[in-house]
Image (spheres, rainbow, N blue to C red):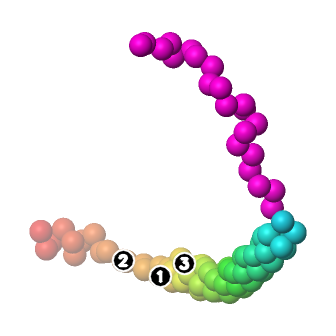
Amino acid sequence: MLTSSTEISSAPRDAVVAARPSLDDWQKLYAYSEEALGKIATEIRSIDDQRTDLTTKKDTIQKQLDGLHGSRTKNVKNVKVRIDAATAANSM
């Protein structure tokens, strides 16, 4: 026979009840979480130290680069050229 798809099942809704975690399960979860967060905190500190070192190196290199750009503009030479018009006209 055909049955409708809207038929209500005979099993009660609360028949499948998940087991509640025990105190030991909670303690294991807490220990794992504490260990994982400790590793993350250690890695964050390491990355912050690296970032500080790299920022110092970047600033030092930027100062050197600025010094090179500054010295390039300071090396300006002024040249005076004298031209004798009579000599220039004769050579053409």
Q: Position of residue 23 (x, y in %)?
A: 87, 69
- Graded by Cα atoms within 10 Å as few (under 14), some (14 to 19) or many (20 or more), the crowding at tag 1 reads few
Q: Residue 69 got which mark?
A: 3
Q: Earlier in the sequence, mark 1 or mark 2?
A: 1
> Residue at the spot x=43%, y=80% of the render?
79
**Helix, strand or loop at mark 2:** loop
Q: Nearer the viewer, residue 31 or 78?
A: 31
Residue 77, numbered label: 1
Given residues 49 and 89, the one toward you in this image is: 49
Q: Earlier in the sequence, mark 2 or mark 3?
A: 3
Left or right of residue 69: residue 33: right
Which quadrant: the N terminus?
A: top left
At which x and y percent is residue 85? 28, 69
Q: Which residues are magenta?
A: 1-21
Local packing at callout 3 (Cα closer than 10 Å; few below 14, some 14-19, many 20+) is: few
| Farthest-out residue, left | 92
**Which-is-in-front pick, marks 2 and 3?**
3
Q: Nearer the viewer, residue 45 or 84?
A: 45
